[in-house]
Image: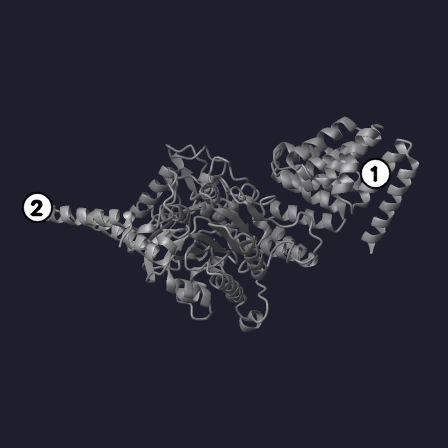
Amino acid sequence: MFDSKSESVALQIQFVIVTGGRFWRQNAGGWSRASLSAMRAVILALVWSFATVQLAAQGTPSGKMPQRPDVYLVTIDTLRADHVHCYGYDKIQTPTLDALAGEGVRFANAFTPSPITNTSHTSILTGLLPSAHGVTDFARPLSGDHTTLAELLKQQGYQTAAFIGAVILDSNTMAPGLDRGFDFYDNFPEHSQSKSRWGRLERRAEDVVHRAEAWRDAHAAGPHFMWVHLYDPHDPYEPPAPYSAQYKDRLYDGEIAYADSALGSFVAHLKQHGWYDNALIIVVGDHGEGLGEHQEETHGVFLYDATLHVPLIIKLPGKHSPRTVQNQARTLDIFPTVLDLLNIEVPSQLDGESLKNFLEWGEGNDRTVIAETDYPLHFGWAPLRAVRADGMKFIEAPRPELYDLSKDPNELHNGYDLSNEAVQKSRKVLADRWARMPAPVSGSVGIGAAESQDDSGTREAGSGSNISEPSKLPDPKDKIEEQNLLHSAMLAGEAGKIADARAALERVLERNPKSETALVQLGSLSLRSSDYQKAVEYLAQARQLRPDDATAAFYEGEAREKSGDLSGAKDALETCVRLNPKQSADARALLGQVYLRLQDYAAAEDQFEATLLLQPEHLEAHLGLARAEILQRRFSEALNELTRLAKAHPGSAEVFELLGQTYSGLGRESDAAKAKLRAKELASKAGK
């Protein structure tokens, strides 16, 4: 027997079939293909609903509906689609991804809108293009105007948690706002004692998975939305054993195979606890990797398929026949797809569209891919935009590019012609898109303007565009070797190989003496090496080239403070906080210390208090505030501050040293002696 809900669905199916058949007989030959498709879609939807009701009634006590499905979003960083076994790459074993594809839907042609980790993940979690959500650079906060997938699922009663594999997605530092909607967001420690990259900059996939499993075990009541981020395929390529040996000549592949094995452990955990069958599991790469194609060693600068084409595999709740979708899809379609599958209203104004038709019926149209990268602006080069549609790829750049992907899938032969129809259509797509965006910053790519082009490839702005032309900035194609050296220097610096980093940066300056990025990195290395005067020289040059660089201003202020140039330090740090007022806690804390040394105690207190507004638990700011109060003989106020700090930071020698000074100022010499002794013990312990 059917329950009342199943009877209702059955009656709806009967009504549609009977009335539809009656209409067909009365109007034989009069239905269009679209009408027939619409009728079939309605019938299939009702049949699906009917079957779901019946399965639920048969498989649960008293005919109760099953719990809403858990949603597991797994993002694997830097994962090219063409380096996964089920995508046709036979030089690697990825059994977990293959098995999920064998039970779900594999999108053969899925693309990210951005080749940068923060930006691409924000698009996944908001369903918006980078130019819409605004997270086009590291540490740029996600505006509260944009709702995240976690926020919407939390509103629907989901328990939410995120487990990240790299500090680059830490919501306290490099990805502010990305934690919105998550009950738990597994950030990195604020002050790591580790000198290794593991635990300080990155977590192994196994570590991320274990943390996720522990949280899931501790939160039995559902439903759950969990985002699990595996960073391992990102460079440097350092897979653990046995993958380091098995893939010794292809370490990137070794990282992918290792990440797949960690994902396998997570899937096995879900199955072991009975959480797998009713789960919606989405596995996707956030972006790809250059691997030397087009001379790009890693990612971020170019918009070729090497860094945009990613795997996308979706396993639906319950059992379904596997399917491969050849149509073009996008990672920003994930957000509306999840909501659509859960029957949650999809917000308007999204750039993504639901893939539900592909998942349930295998039908749908290709999605036009728009890709954007502002990363070249870091180096003073032109940002890029791309459109991938109808088998063509157009890249807007100082020297524009066009590729016929059916004949040139590796994008090696630029067929750009101003009059080409694909160029005109693509520019219109970008112009329509740009028209809805806020006014662009100087140096952004000109879209849709009429142009003339001489034999050298430079462009002149035509009429009708208020957007800065890309010809004003160098084309990244001419600068990619410089970027590779800069990236090598960064990795060497992170690994403590200072000489190697310095050598790479000096090679950059040989190519381009005005590389502000190289000068800033050399200044930072000199600062770490305690060569403060050299650091000041490099950083002052960098700031002359780019006066609006808040990072260079901060480093210069730090170098000048350490060298004793307090006036110069004050000027540099004041510039830093003016350029970056909402994300300058460390700069303000250091500026407060400089004011203390200049005996401007009121100004020092202002900076410490401003720091605490940005970061209420900033220890250096609290200590600085206490010092200012002590220096002004406001010992009672200092005591209140330090008593609280001693409880919050019982292992800080500095807290107890200041507490001793405060007790002495209050005439409490016995307490002062105890505090100073404790400070000495902690300092001795820390020095061991």
Query: Badge 1, how many Cα within 10 Å: few under 14, some, many 20+?
Result: many
- The way the protein has been coloured in the rendering is one colour
Give the image location of residue 286, x and y in percent: 47, 53
On screen, residue 392 versus residue 678, left or right, reads left
Please, what is the three-letter code of the amino acid marked with disc 2?
Asn
Q: Residues within 10 Å of mark 2 (few under 14, many from 20)?
A: few
Q: Is residue 568 visible?
A: no
Q: Amino acid at mark 1?
A: Leu
Point out residue 200 in the picture as x, y percentages from the top left corner: 65, 54
- The residue that mark 2 highlights is 27
> In the figure, residue 240 lies in which quadrant?
bottom right
Q: The N terminus lies in which quarter of the figure? A: bottom left
Residue occupying image coordinates x 30% and y 55%: 54
The earlier-in-sequence mark between 2 and 1 is 2
Out of 463 and 261, give the one closest to the viewer. 261
Q: Position of residue 139 (x, y in %)?
A: 57, 43
Secondary structure of residue under mark 1: helix
Give above or below for 372 relative to 604.
below
Q: Is residue 522 left or right of residue 321?
A: right
Numbered circles on residues, count: 2
Badge number at residue 658:
1
